[in-house]
Amino acid sequence: MDIAKDLALIDQLCARDFPAEHDPYHTAWLGPGDWPDASDCYAYEAALVERLTERWGESDRWGTVTLEERIARGEVIPEPWAMLTALAIDVRTWIVSGGGRRVTVAVADRDEESRPQLWVGVTRSAPP
């Protein structure tokens, strides 16, 4: 588990050009991927959130339940937000200064059969 390495990966995602698609975004998994214990994933998330907050200020924190309900009613939610709704319940988002990009971090913990994983996404679009 190397926070410096994951911060560098987030920087790379922020610097990378977006594809020409309608709702372009970049995503990655952070940390070791196979956490020794679920609590380790949440502790790593807290440490990473602390570093990102030092960089960009307080995050917006929101839940995906409303998006999940909108999807269930047939509304089309753009990516990466629809995918994130399937992965996580709790989300943190920062606006990156100087680039108009958003960095979103979430623990993918909706699948009770799997151990949680730490997800990051970078996009220009705001959560719907």
Image (cartoon, rainbow, N blue to C red):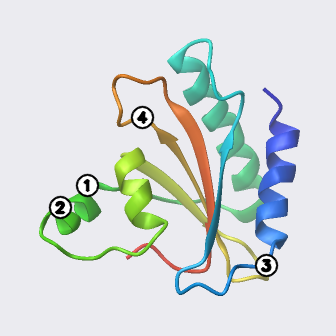
Picture coordinates of residue 91, whole percent (x, y): 47, 52
Picture coordinates of residue 88, whole percent (x, y): 41, 45
Q: Eyeballing the image, is 109 above or below 17?
A: above
Q: Which mark is residue 17?
A: 3
Real-space CA distance between mark 2 and mark 4, rounded to the nearest whole angstrom: 18 Å
Amino acid type of the residue tagged 3 in the rendering: Asp
* Image-based side of 71 in relation to 80, left or right: left
Q: Kindly identify the residue that appears in the image at 77 percent across and 68 percent down.
A: 14
Amino acid type of the residue tagged 2 in the rendering: Glu
Q: Which residue is mark 4?
A: 109
Label 2 sits on a secondary structure element that is helix
* Mark 2 / mark 3, whichever is N-terminal: 3
* Mark 1 / mark 3, whichever is N-terminal: 3
Real-space CA distance between mark 2 and mark 1, rounded to the nearest whole angstrom: 6 Å
Q: Kindly identify the residue that appears in the image at 62 percent across and 36 percent down.
A: 46
Other residues around mark 4 within 10 Å, as few (<14) / some (14–19) / many (≥20) = some
Q: Which residue is mark 2?
A: 69
Q: Which residue is mark 1?
A: 65
The quadrant holding residue 6 is: top right
The quadrant holding residue 121 is: bottom right
Report if residue 62 is visible in the image.
no
Label 3 sits on a secondary structure element that is loop
Other residues around mark 1 within 10 Å, as few (<14) / some (14–19) / many (≥20) = some
